[in-house]
Amino acid sequence: MELKIDMMAMPPYSMSGKYRKQFFVGLATTGTIGDFGVWTELAYGGPQKFAEADGPMDIRIPLSINEKYLQVVVGGDYTLPVGKGLLVQGQYIYQGQGSLFAPYVEVDFDELNAALSGGGEYAPEIKPAHYLYGRLGYDFTSDISVDMVMLHGVNDKGGLVRPSYNHKLFDAVNLEVSAIKTYGKGELKSIPAQGRIAVKYSF
């Protein structure tokens, strides 16, 4: 998404968006330390930049990622001796360019108008974000399992919780029933709870 400002048009503001190619280079490692599984992921890259403005009267402000950035994941898991085994998984996620929950920048039009009238530039700041991910998984049988996933955004001051029930119906067909509930402030708080039913076929 991109905000375009044409000082000769009325109204001067318009939004546009397009799909852009993204290029990343990365490295992933995985292994074990005793009975713990551990892994790390590192990726650096980003999308092709938006086109440059045509002139001083044509102003363009990217509302989504427009620069290269870094992503880092460090995680581990362990199976607790509860019943047939309770899988406990945790991850730390570093997102170098903005929020996973709110990928577009919010424009403060008062600041924008003040910058334009003063002859300055307006460039919304996209801050790095930090996340904690947790998952509990349990297999009742080879065909029936349940999961509980939680993703908490430190910068977002909120996150989501997603419980799910999985039932293998046939060799390649799986039924999944899940719910998503967000918590926290702002946009996260206003998102209603959702329920989902999915039938997946693996081939």
Image: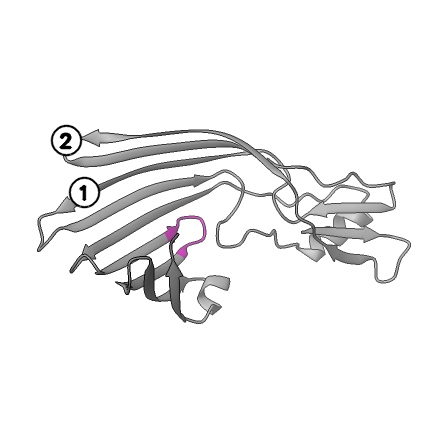
Q: Which residues are magenta?
A: 152-158
Write down the quadrant of residue 202 in the picture: bottom left
Residue 73 position (above or below residue 89)? above
Residue occupied by mark 1? 78
Label for residue 34?
A: 2
- Name which residue lies at 30% across and 38% down: 75
Left or right: 41 in relation to 82:
right
Asked if residue 200 is among those painted magenta in the image, a careful observer would answer: no
Which type of secondary structure does the marked residue at label 2 adopt?
loop
Residue 48 located left or right of residue 78: right
Q: Nearer the viewer, residue 107 or 182?
A: 182
Q: Is residue 139 above or below residue 123?
A: below
Is residue 161 among the parts visible in the rendering?
yes
Left or right? Give the position of 110 relative to 119: left
Give the residue displayed 39% in from the left and 41% down from the top: 93
Looking at the image, tell me whether mark 1 or mark 2 is earlier in sequence order: 2
Q: Residue at x 39, y 33 (%)?
A: 41
Amino acid carrying mark 2 in the image? Gly
Label 1 crowd bin: few (<14), some (14–19), many (20+), radius 10 Å: some
Comparing 187 with 2, the one in front is 2
Contact? badges 1 and 2 (CB < 8 Å): no
